[in-house]
Image (cartoon, rainbow, N blue to C red):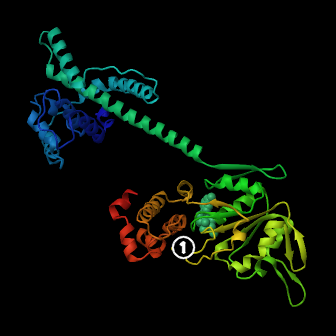
Amino acid sequence: MARRAKHSPEAAEAWAASLIGARGTVSALTEKTRGPVRFWLTSNGLPSAFVRGGDGFPGLTMATLCAAWNDTTNETLESLRRLASETASTTAAQDDTTTTTTTEQDDMALQESLAMTRGTRTTTTTTTTAPEAATQLATLIAQMAGGAIDENKVRAIVDEQAGASIAAASRHVLENVKTELTSALEKIATAQKIEIEVKDHTGTVRNVGRQHKTFPRLLKMAAARRNVWLRGPAGSGKTTAARMVAEALGLAFYFTGAIDTEYKLLGFTDAQGRIVKRQFREAWENGGVFLFDEVDASLPNAVLALNAALANAYCDFPDGCIPKHPDCIIIAAANTYGLGADATYVGRMRQDGAFLDRFVKLDWAYDEELERATCPNAAWCAHVQAIRANVTRQGLQVIVSPRASYDGAALLAHGLTWDETEEATLRGAMTTEQWRSVAIDASARKAA
Ligand SMILES: Nc1ncnc2c1ncn2[C@@H]1O[C@H](COP(=O)(O)OP(=O)(O)O)[C@@H](O)[C@H]1O
Ligand SMILES: [Mg+2]
């Protein structure tokens, strides 16, 4: 019985279905199409003689074979199993004679399928199908032996061997296609990986790893020592990108959020006469990347203090005018281009035109490939992206940012259920009505 274990019922069923049609759909069997069903039955553990006839068994009729194949509840199969086990018959001898040959055929099938998946085989040869071959061979041998050989038995052996070989070949082809696909996907993933290597002013080469698709452009703007206005939706990675520019260039990173007074940039002299310096001053005087984050939420009059500095490379601090360090890079990050609030970003203020004019602009959209590559839970990330696509399609003023992916992955990893995670990261950001229109039902979610 060693050979049967090598062909799972599932593989046999798939092979048979590919030749004669899926279970439940075959109206009748013929001499040519019953072979695969017989093979499927023996793969399910039914003795070969019981199925094909021989050793005193009449063999299963076309009608029974067809009924067993079409009965997807497997009740017929079970009845046949019971019937077979009630009779004390074995086909061990028949099985043993074919074991070695099958192994050799498996090897040949492996070589063939490897050649096919590697594309080295350019021509296909049309051969007789397994049941046809069995019939022809059985007829030939019967003729040669002048009727001394049991034709049914020969057909059964060849039938089974040919079937086994094809099933093995299919399995090997599938396995090899899978391997080739995996390695192709890995190659694509590597090619898409934006690994950034930069040489800083000291000649040191730094690798800052996987970054946003627009990061190389930002880096060039920074290298050109332009003031950059990064505009992008919440969670698109603007703050991170500015920090990574500093890392890539080997510079210190300084940061200020929205301001309501110029003192938060320029500093001041306290009651004891001491100069209080702000982050901007450090970058301006000593070099470094200064991120003016959420700049469009600042009071326009507060940022005006920067105008002269940005234009002239000199800045008036409480204790004097200081020239700009050559390695001071100023990046402003915002949800708008400073032209005022919109339906999503209602807290943004229209900034002075002269201030805006001092920046080169760079659009910082969501990078969904980066999100997929860096989110630790692929199914959750796919779910977030599907909901985001629905939001965009429907033109809703709702934010579904990559933060929903990262936060959700962390919550799931810490034991929150899918529903609780959804509530915390997606549903909470919209009205019940909006949620109803973008939610993905449970069955689609499982597929994600
Ligand atoms: N290159 C990146 N690799 C991995 N995660 C990133 C990357 N860029 C941003 N993120 C993550 O995305 C989220 C939003 O990024 P953030 O820079 O705060 O966006 P923004 O400033 O545009 O609102 C954060 O959780 C951050 O850690
Ligand atoms: Mg930010």
Relative image position of residue 47 (x, y in whole percent) = 19, 35
Q: Nearer the viewer, residue 200 or 34?
A: 200
At a point 39% along the width and 72% down the height, the residue shown is: 435
Q: In which quarter of the image is residue 243?
A: bottom right
Give left or right: position of 176 versus 87. Answer: right
Relative image position of residue 174 (x, y in whole percent) = 39, 36
Q: Dividing the image into four equal quarters, which quarter contains ligand 2?
A: bottom right
Q: Quadrant of residue 211?
A: bottom right
**Residue 366 drawn above or below residue 119:** below
**Dot 1 corresponds to which residue?**
342
Give left or right: position of 205 versus 131. Answer: right
Q: Which of 109 and 385 is in front in this view?
A: 385
Helix, strand or loop at disc 1? loop
Relative image position of residue 84 (x, y in whole percent) = 15, 39
| Residue 203 visible, this angle | yes
**Residue 390 drawn above or below residue 7:** below
Label 1: few (<14), some (14–19) or many (≥20) C-alpha neighbours in 10 Å:
few
At a point 16% along the width and 31% down the height, the residue shown is: 34
**Residue 157 drawn above or below residue 437:** above
Q: Which amino acid does label 1 sit on?
A: Asp
At a point 38% along the width and 26% down the height, the residue shown is: 109
Quarter in which the N terminus is drawn:
top left
Q: In which quarter of the image is residue 359?
A: bottom right
Q: Which residue lies furthest to the bottom in this view?
A: 271
| Residue 86 visible, this angle | no
